[in-house]
Image (cartoon, rainbow, N blue to C red):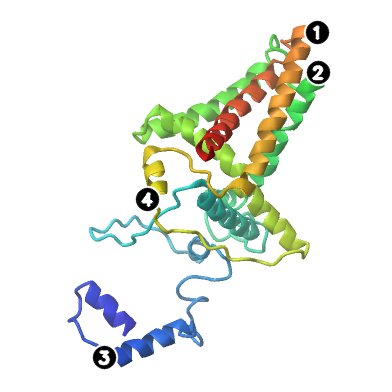
Amino acid sequence: MLIDSLYSNNEQRDNKKESPEELLKEAHFLATCTFERGTKWGSEMGFSYECLLESTFTGYLLHCKGWTSVYNYPKRPAFLGCTTIDVKDAMVQMRKFNSALLQVGLSKFSPLTFAVSRMSAIQSMCYGYLALQPLFTISLLILGTVPQFCFFKDIPLYPKLTSPWLAVFAIIWASSLLQHLHEVLSSGDPLVTWWYEQRIWVLKIVTGSLFGYLDVVLKWIGITATVFRLTNKAIDKDKMEKYEKGTFDFQGAELFMIPLGFLVLWNLVCFIGGSWRIVVNGGFGDMFGQFLLSTYILVLSYTTLIEGMRRKG
């Protein structure tokens, strides 16, 4: 009956009127969640439920079995849905995604081991990048705290301003920013989109990715179990207006903002202390790299946090 209703919605089969008793019986059967029991669904057919991120994991397994993807853009929309429109719901979803991805990346199904002999090296590396992306939170937290502390203590970490080796660090950093800028502009988006995406990247790495990473660690040491977190997809008029205006809505996201607040406060204290040392003792050329890094992180994260505080106020 369920398949018949899908056919009728697609106008591929004549509409068939069902009695209320039959519809109620089907609804009860559907609610039991046992209609897949004894079938190949979930193992050889349909989505694989061995991972909470079933859609991505299923596509990954299909590629490992030799399937190839094709671009399909039907005239009739194949999927209609809504995305998250505020910071809290976006971070809850990001936490769930990153937790599931990292579990795959560190399991026997890791793209760097399981997929190497089942797909091309480039494709397995792409899957590996996605699966291990939550580990960015470690590198960003180190990059956002250690150089700043050394800047505060007057300990140089990068080459001097007059050293030619500083160009190596500068070229790598600038090339990554320019690559992202090229992708944004080539997609037809304005320059401000690049700025927003830079800010959002820092926001999601130190919030959603961090909590997703901690979920995996706590599960591995046996403190917590896997939890399926639902993402709120309800449409709120006020939130939708903020979303359409391109403004951040931080309502209900206080827990996720703690790491970002710490990052901002740490960078601000170290920046003020390190800058004061430079004014008093000199040595700006020795600390130029750390000064620039601290300034950049402050600009990205501070403006986001202040905007959130202003919206809540």
x and y percentages locating residue 154 in the rendered image: 81, 18
Q: Earlier in the sequence, mark 4 or mark 3?
A: 3
Looking at marks 2 and 4 on the same chain, the residue that comes earlier in the sequence is marked by: 2
Which of the 4 quarters of the picture holds residue 80? bottom left
**In the picture provided, is 304 more to the left or to the right than 246?**
right
Q: Quadrant of residue 296?
A: top right
Q: Are marks 4 and 3 in contact (CB under 8 Å)?
A: no
Q: Residue 181, position in %: x, y?
A: 45, 29
Mark 4 residue crowding within 10 angstroms, few (<14) / some (14–19) / many (20+)? few
Q: Which amino acid type is marked by label 2? A: Asp
234, above or below 151, in the image: below
Q: Amino acid at mark 3?
A: Ser
Q: Residues within 10 Å of mark 3 (few under 14, many from 20)?
A: few
Question: Which residue: 66% across, 43% down?
Answer: 258
First in residue order: circle 3 vs circle 1: 3
* Residue located beneath label 1 in the image: 281
Vertical comparison of 31 with 274: above or below: below
Distance of label 1 from label 4 (alpha carbons) = 55 Å
Q: Mark 1: which amino acid?
A: Asn
Say which of marks 2 and 4 sits in front. 4
User: In front of the other: label 4 or label 3?
Assistant: 4
| Residue 159 visible in this rendered orientation of the protein | no
Q: Are marks 3 and 1 in contact (CB under 8 Å)?
A: no
Q: Which residue is mark 3?
A: 19
Q: CA distance from mark 3 to mark 2?
A: 80 Å
Kindly report the distance in space between the C-alpha atoms of the residues bearing marks 2 and 1: 10 Å
Q: Residues within 10 Å of mark 2 (few under 14, many from 20)?
A: some
Q: Is residue 142 left or right of residue 168?
A: right
